[in-house]
Image: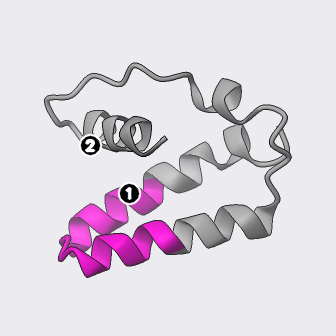
Amino acid sequence: AKEMARQFFAAGSGGAVTYHGKDMRAAHTGMNISEQEYLAVMDDIMGALAKNGMSDETKKDVLAILYMLKGEIIRV
């Protein structure tokens, strides 16, 4: 799962990586992820970015991606 997340974010942010995983809806169907769980993961991701010294621009880009994907992950 960590490798798929790494590939996803690297590819989505313009890196020289190809994402080979499922689309977000397929990957999360049946998991019944709540809004609170989703927000907790977002907090973890943003905390990891801050801990690793990512720029504010990178953090904004990741946050935008996470919000865009919300409907593909929550309660599918």
27 vs 34, left or right, is left
Image quadrant containing the C terminus: top right
Mark 1–mark 2 Cα distance, whole angstroms, equals 8 Å
Place of residue 10 in the rendered image (x, y in percent of width and height, measured from the top left) = 26, 40
Circles 1, 2 touching at the beta carbon (< 8 Å): yes
Q: Residue at x 59, y 65 (%)?
A: 41
Membership of 53 in magenta stretch: yes
**Residue 43 numbered mark, or none:** none
Q: Position of residue 56 (x, y in %)?
A: 24, 74
- The magenta segment is 44-64
The residue nearer to you, when weighing 72 against 30, is 30
Q: Which mark is residue 62?
A: 1
| Residue appearing at x 27%, y 22% in the figure | 18
Residue at the image position 79 percent from the left and 52 percent from the top: 33
Secondary structure at numbered mark 2: loop
Residue identifier under label 2: 13
